[in-house]
Image (cartoon, rainbow, N blue to C red):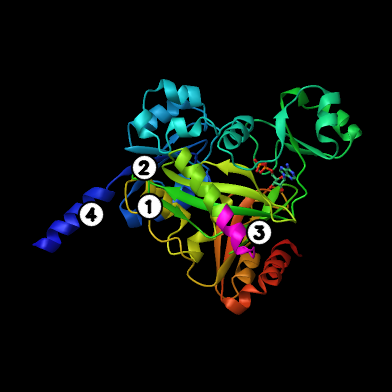
Amino acid sequence: MVNGFKKQAKTNMVGKRVGVIGGGQLAWMMALEAPALSIDLIVQAESETEPAVKIAKQFVIGNVDDAIATNKMAQMCDVITFENEFVDLKGLQELNLKEVFKPSLNTLKPLLDKYHQRSFLQQVNLPVPQFSLWSSQEQVIADYGFPLVLKARRHGYDGQGTFIIKDLECLQQLAKTVPVTELLVEEFVPFERELGIIAARNEAGEIAIYPVTETFQQNQVCHWTITPADVPKKVAEEVKAIAHTILDKLEVIGVFGIEFFLTADNRVLVNEIAPRTHNSGHYTLDGCETSQFTMQLQALTGLPLGSTELKSAGAIMVNLLGFEESDTDYLQKRSQILQIPNSFLHWYGKTSRPGRKLGHVTVILDEKELTQAKSIIEQIESLWYGE
Ligand code: ADP
């Protein structure tokens, strides 16, 4: 009798319909985890070919910034969350569905534009690179020198919209094709490493923070991560404290990915807040007690957050980036990679083009293997990119 009652209460608590704006691999991984929580996942995807559409309970077709499609999806769900932040905030506000969005539209407001986001971080006294809006060419060069960094204020991803300007010629070249006066200007940070962290908060204010991850970007695109990052304890604590402050100040509900620069003298600067699950947290799927996708679903349906502990000493994640235009599924390369002990390969089912994220590999490591993390990454990359 008592057991029967308990079971009923639990079912009521998790029986939610969750909508996701976006239908890419992040929504796909969320859709894979939803059934275990008795959650129906509904996605708003740009087309039926997007990864999450195949496995979502229901879908609506609409671009990420199509608020009318979101309104349609709202009729089918209790909660709406985000896979992608390129939304039309004003359009969503006008729908008067405020309570439905988790994180709320107020939480998103300071984050969608890179200049607003840097300003928010500065206001709450968190360390960021020196930044400003464009003033004049002379002033920008006087303030920052070369190299300097220019960034599109919105819609930048995987380095699209981020320009590292090494000299005047490079700046003048860019100005021919891009309206540089509309960009965010910032100092070039000669970082030693880049770090990332995944953190979650629920409506009750409970916060869960994952271990600090080292991330490696080439040409501004993430290639691999190692968790835990091999950084001094003080650095890891600072990164976690910053994540805690950000989630608290913004009253976040859901999962956020936060990226950092670590300088040679161990200074930590916040580079970017992603108001959603993040590529730097993919290792959590196989590597942690609770994946970032389950965590997201738990956070926004009012369930306890769960453990962020690693299941072993560490984990690496390697992105499988497209290197050609093709619709092959690379089965042979994938099976070779899977020969590596304790490896897990997630294939998003997308057609290939250069630079596109087609899948990722996680390898779970024991204490000894963790010291060889970089050579395991090299092994995977040579199997993937080699002939
Ligand atoms: P996106 O939004 O496209 O991910 P980011 O702002 O995160 O763009 O930049 C992508 C990458 O470019 C970073 O991970 C880093 O490697 C490099 N980068 C960005 N800003 C700076 C900077 N101020 N100084 C040095 N490198 C930078």
Q: Which residue has dot 3 on it?
A: 224
Mark nearer the viewer, 3 or 2: 3
Q: Which residues are magenta?
A: 229-238
CA distance separating discs 3 and 2: 30 Å
The x and y percentages for residue 88 are 52, 26
Q: Which numbered disc flags the more N-terminal residue, 2 or 4?
A: 4
Q: Are marks 3 and 1 in contact (CB under 8 Å)?
A: no
* Position in image of residue 244 (x %, y %): 49, 48
Gap in Å between the C-alphas at discs 2 and 4? 17 Å
Classify residue 111 by image quadrant: top right
> What residue would you read off at disc 1?
34
* Mark 3 vs 1, N-terminal side: 1
- Residue type marked 3: Trp
Cα separation, mark 4 vs mark 3, equals: 38 Å
Quarter the C terminus occupies: bottom right
Under circle 4, the secondary element is: helix
| Mark linked to residue 18 | 2
Q: Is residue 356 above or below residue 231?
A: above
Camera-near label (3 vs 1) is 3
Mark 3 Cα shell of 10 Å, populated few (<14), some (14-19), many (≥20):
many
Q: Earlier in the sequence, mark 1 or mark 2?
A: 2
213 shown above or below 68: below
Label 1, secondary structure: give it: helix
* Residue marked by disc 4: 10
Residue at far bottom of view: 368
Numbered disc 3: secondary structure: strand
Distance between the alpha carbons at the discs numbered 4 and 1: 15 Å
Instruction: Check disc 2: other Cα within 10 Å, few if <14, some if 14-19, many if 20+.
Output: many
Task: Specify the amino acid type for callout 4.
Answer: Lys
Cβ–Cβ under 8 Å for marks 1 and 2: yes
Q: CA distance from mark 1 to mark 2?
A: 9 Å
